[in-house]
Image (tube, rainbow, N blue to C red):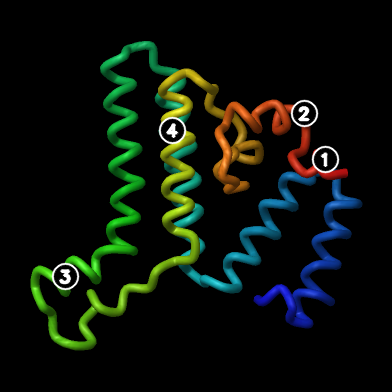
Amino acid sequence: MVFTSSSFLFLFLPAFILAQCYLPYKNLSFVVFSTFFYFVGEGWFTSIAVFSILINFVFGLAIDSSQNLNLRRIWLAAAVVSNLAVLVIFKYAGFISVTLFDPSPGSWAQSIHLPLGISFITFHAISYIIDIYRANARAERSLLKDPLIFRQCIHLRDVAVLLNRGSYVEQYD
């Protein structure tokens, strides 16, 4: 869906604005509309973004709740490796296979789709995990307040106060 398309301007945008004005759960409607918008452009690759959010939510909770430094390091390493694995698979698998193995034209390795924003999603997730590991921020306990959903180029400590106030979008009222 393009921002200048009639379906965006006359269907999606008015529905989103009405939802933000009249629904009691603004963060939930924000997440639903954002996910739908991403799905229209990327289809099933939306599941990769959702997977990233869920796995980093779990890793964040595990790191935050662990008191053992070695266990925290293991969780951190697992989180970083998991995030980078997704990036390597979708962004670099084709390049690596062509460079190292010279596959036949039209093979699966040459036709891997690059999901929109995969690098941004990955590095933002890693910064979230590192903030928690360094104790610069606490892991969010609610997925609807999870900053990974909102995908801004910021640190958790900078937005946690806004998220805990009730609604992230209230900042712009």
- Determine the residue positioned at 33% across, 63% down: 91
Work out which quarter of the rendered image holds the N terminus and state it. Answer: bottom right
Q: Position of residue 133 (x, y in %)?
A: 41, 23
Work out which quarter of the rendered image holds the C terminus and state it. Answer: top right
Q: Position of residue 71 (x, y in %)?
A: 29, 20
Q: Judge left or right: residue 137 versus residue 1.
A: left
- Determine the residue positioned at 50% across, 46% down: 53
Q: Secondary structure at mark 2?
A: loop
How crowded pointer 4 is (Cα within 10 Å; few <14, some 14-19, many 20+) is rated as: many
The mark nearer the N terminus, 3 or 2, is 3
In the image, is residue 8 above or below residue 151?
Answer: below
Numbered-mark total:
4
The mark nearer the N terminus, 4 or 2, is 4
Alpha carbon separation for disc pair 1 and 2: 9 Å
Q: Judge left or right: residue 38 versus residue 56.
A: right
Which residue in the protein does label 2 denote?
165
- Determine the residue positioned at 29% across, 23% down: 73
Quadrant position of residue 137: top right
Q: Are marks 3 and 1 in contact (CB under 8 Å)?
A: no
Residue 97 disc label:
3
Which residue in the protein does label 1 denote?
170
Please state which amino acid type lies under the numbered disc 2.
Arg
Please state which amino acid type lies under the numbered disc 4.
Ile
Which residue in the protein does label 4 denote?
129
Q: Are marks 3 and 4 in contact (CB under 8 Å)?
A: no
The mark nearer the N terminus, 4 or 1, is 4
Name the residue furthest top. Answer: 67
Name the residue furthest bottom. Answer: 105
